[in-house]
């Protein structure tokens, strides 16, 4: 399975609760207007499919200051499956993209009970808009899932190994990595596919850097694309896709997460570069994060919308013998970058979803 689409790990602007056709009778408007991240977070732990270790979900309850590991299996009495890549909260449901199990779980957000599953090939990225959930399929497609029928109703080919998505102004943007084509320098990647949501037709391919992976969007509609390079000579770069779809290199980095008019950046998977930039100008700002407590081998990053706190997931070790088979961590920092606490979670914590 392709490792870290990436964040990366981490499509969090799409996690806001939105009124939609998904179980409207059970959807509480009072919950919808609460700031996202007010109540808690789901940490999606990928596990290790090759070692037959199931994925898992950790529930962080901020209101009651509690934590529950193995939330999915405890609640449902079955293992979660293999290779969770990402998730999205839409209406009253939580949708989880299970790459190794070739399905999307549909889960009641409040109870944690599974309500349905949708068969789809090697899902990676996942987002939602209107009454639909969209997934990138590793076989080269983006699939559209109806949230009432829980079926794939349309597919569109975008290119080899699409990874992540963002929605902006009625268009869906999907990174196309060609991520398995290392020997040919990912020649069929280097792009972000643009899809008109009204027609579900691809309207453009936007050229970006090598091996594009995770995306994040600031409050001004700028989309930032992490281009991972070749993990050797071509170093990772963050590209910026502005409102006019003009793409350009923005800053060096392997992980990026936008919040308001800030872009939080980690230099590389084993770097001590933790920086904050103005997302419009690219100028460094004085606020840094991770002061004195930088995680070993970070996997994903997210900013809690309701508070501006920064969360970074970590494998917790650089030892190749244990880094993919032992529990990882989530490190929490306040909005000024000061370390707050560490949560011990599951193996390979791949994404954080705030609710």
Image (cartoon, helix red, strand yellow):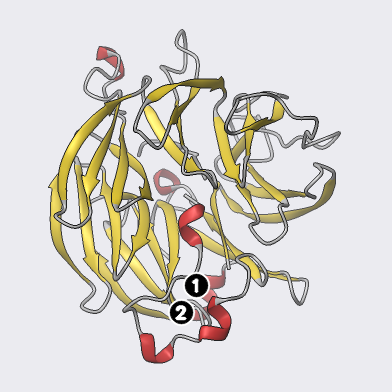
Figure check: 12 above or below 283: below
Q: Residue at x 71, y 29 (%)?
A: 274
Q: Residue at x 34, y 32 (%)?
A: 245
Give coordinates of residue 145: x percent, y percent: 23, 65
How many marks are shown on the rendered structure? 2
Figure check: 255 above or below 116: above
> Splitting the image into 4 quarters, where does residue 189 fall?
top left
Q: Residue at x 43, y 53 (%)?
A: 86
Residues under numbered marks 2 and 1 in contact, where contact means CB atoms less than 8 Å apart = yes
Crowding at dot 1, Cα within 10 Å, few <14 / some 14-19 / many 20+, comes out as some
Q: Which residue is mark 1?
A: 73
Give coordinates of residue 165: x percent, y percent: 36, 46
Figure check: 90 above or below 349: below
> Splitting the image into 4 quarters, where does residue 161 fall?
top left
Side (left or right) of 85 relative to 304: left
Is residue 233 shown to the viewer in this render?
Answer: yes
- The residue sitting at the front extreme is 244
User: SS at mark 1?
Assistant: helix
User: SS at mark 2?
Assistant: helix
Side (left or right) of 260 relative to 273: left
Quadrant showing the N terminus: top left
Q: Which residue is mark 2?
A: 76
Give coordinates of residue 279: x percent, y percent: 59, 34
Residue 34 versus residue 94: which sits nearer the camera? Answer: 34
- The residue sitting at the top extreme is 233
Crowding at dot 2, Cα within 10 Å, few <14 / some 14-19 / many 20+, comes out as few
How far apart are the alpha carbons under marks 2 and 1? 5 Å
Is residue 120 shown to the viewer in this render?
Answer: no
Figure check: 37 above or below 163: below
| Residue 312: mark | none
Side (left or right) of 166 relative to 322: left
Quadrant showing the C terminus: bottom right
């Amino acid at each position: 399975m392709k490792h870290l689409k990436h964040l990366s790990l981490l499509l969090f602007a799409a996690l806001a609760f939105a009124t939609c056709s998904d179980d409207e009778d059970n959807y509480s408007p009072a919950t919808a207007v609460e700031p996202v991240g007010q109540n808690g977070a789901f940490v999606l732990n990928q596990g290790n499919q090759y070692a037959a270790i199931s994925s898992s979900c950790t529930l962080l309850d901020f209101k009651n200051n509690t934590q529950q590991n193995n939330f999915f299996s405890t609640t449902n009495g079955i293992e979660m499956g293999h290779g969770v890549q990402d998730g999205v909260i839409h209406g009253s449901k939580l949708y989880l993209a299970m790459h190794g199990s070739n399905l999307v779980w549909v889960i009641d957000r409040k109870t944690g009970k599974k309500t349905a599953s949708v068969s789809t090939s090697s899902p990676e990225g996942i987002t939602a808009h209107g009454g639909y959930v969209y997934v990138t399929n590793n076989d080269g497609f983006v699939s559209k899932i109806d949230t009432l029928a829980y079926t794939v109703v349309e597919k569109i080919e975008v290119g080899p190994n699409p990874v992540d998505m963002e929605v902006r102004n009625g268009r869906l943007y999907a990174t196309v990595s060609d991520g398995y084509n290392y020997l040919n320098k990912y020649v069929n990647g280097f792009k972000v596919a643009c899809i008109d949501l009204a027609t579900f037709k691809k309207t453009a391919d936007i050229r970006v850097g090598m091996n594009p992976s995770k995306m994040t969007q600031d409050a001004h509609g700028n989309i930032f694309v992490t281009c991972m390079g070749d993990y050797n000579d071509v170093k990772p770069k963050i590209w910026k896709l502005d409102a006019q779809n003009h793409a350009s290199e923005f800053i060096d980095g392997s992980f990026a997460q936008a919040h308001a008019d800030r872009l939080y950046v980690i230099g590389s998977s084993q770097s001590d570069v933790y920086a904050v930039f103005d997302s419009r100008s690219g100028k460094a700002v004085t606020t840094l994060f991770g002061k004195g407590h930088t995680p070993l081998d970070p996997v994903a990053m997210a900013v809690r919308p309701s508070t501006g706190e920064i969360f970074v997931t970590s494998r917790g070790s650089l030892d190749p013998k244990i880094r993919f088979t032992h529990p990882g961590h989530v490190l929490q920092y306040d909005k000024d970058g000061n370390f707050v606490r560490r949560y011990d979670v599951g193996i390979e914590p791949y994404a954080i979803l705030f609710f």
